[in-house]
Image: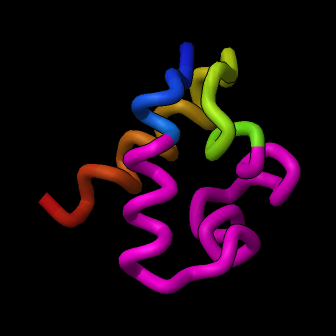
Amino acid sequence: MFISIELAEKVRVKRAKAQQTKKAVAEELGIKPQTYTKVENGDYDAPKRIYEAVMNWLVEDL
């Protein structure tokens, strides 16, 4: 499952608005901080579990 640069931007914006560290969000998503950095950078072909965790995290405020 591909995390595009546009999706990565949405992740960065949500983290900034929540004033959370990368490490805190990574823990919340159940992934390593290094993997979360790949998510925020975009252009990342994430495993299904990571992609689903990111998408669920993004939509939980809607």
Residue 3 found in image quarter = top right
Residue 33 in the image, given as x and y percentages of width and height = 82, 59
Task: Specify the quadrant of the image occupied by residue 62.
Answer: bottom left
Asked if 19 appears above or below 29 in the picture, the reply is below
Is 23 positioned to the left or the right of 17 in the image? right
Q: Position of residue 46 (x, y in %)?
A: 67, 23
| Residue 15 located left or right of residue 50 | left
Residue 35 falls inside the magenta stretch: yes
Q: Is residue 2 above or below residue 8?
A: above
Residue 30 x/y as whole percent: 68, 58
Identify the residue at horizontal 62%, vertical 36% (top origin). 50
Magenta residue span: 9-37
Q: Is residue 26 above or below residue 50?
A: below
Farthest left residue in view: 62
Residue 34 is covered by the magenta coloring: yes
60 relative to 40 in the view: left or right: left
Q: Identify the residue shown where x is 46% and y is 51%.
A: 11
Residue 2 in the image, given as x and y percentages of width and height:
55, 15
